[in-house]
Amino acid sequence: MNDVLHIVFDGAAMVAAGQGNILASRLIHRAHAEPGWFLYAPACALVEADRARPGTAEHVAALPGVIVLDMDLPTALAVAREDTWAPAHTEHAAQPTPERPDGAVVATAVPQEWKGKAVRVLDLSP
């Protein structure tokens, strides 16, 4: 059986990872060490995380196994419809694509922020 798991870190998950959150650390390790585990860091969420905890962007972007998602035209159009860029980019990244037909799970330390959104959430809060 070929299990594939796609996970998108929101800004809060990135900050939590930098603060030693064990669940976030395990996801980072798995994305680096296990075939079929993919971990994404949307660029807009990376900026938000770095504003909350300076140095986070460089740290997350340097991690092996973390794929930084740039802002291409479809992403820019999706983000432009929303009030906040980081959550919009994260939500857009979690939607199904040809590469991720089942979409991705949003990993977050603030799951209440995702209530009512059309995404699956992985709660990293302690």
Image: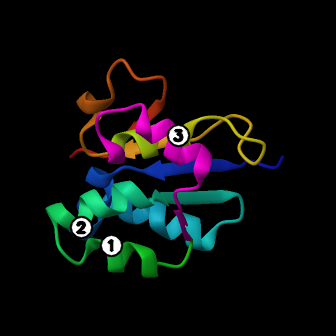
Tell me how far mark 1 sits from mark 3, CA to CA: 23 Å
Q: Is residue 124 left or right of residue 120?
A: left
Earlier residue among tags 1 and 3: 1
Give the residue type that dot 2 points to: Asp
Mark 3 or 2, closer to the camera: 3
In the displayed structure, does residue 45 sit left or right of residue 2?
A: left
Identity of the residue drawn at 36% across and 17% down = 116
- Looking at the rendered image, the disc whose residue lies closer to the viewer, 1 or 3, is 3
Relative image position of residue 10 (x, y in whole percent): 36, 49
Please provide percent x and percent y for residue 23.
35, 55
> Amino acid under label 3?
Leu
**Residue 43 at x, y percent in the picture:** 43, 61
Magenta span covers which residues?
A: 66-86
Mark 3 Cα shell of 10 Å, populated few (<14), some (14-19), many (≥20): few
- Identify residue for label 3: 77
Marks 1/2 in contact by CB < 8 Å: the verdict is yes
Mark 3–mark 2 contact, CB under 8 Å? no
Report the disc number at residue 57: 1
Q: Mark 1 is on which residue type?
A: Ala
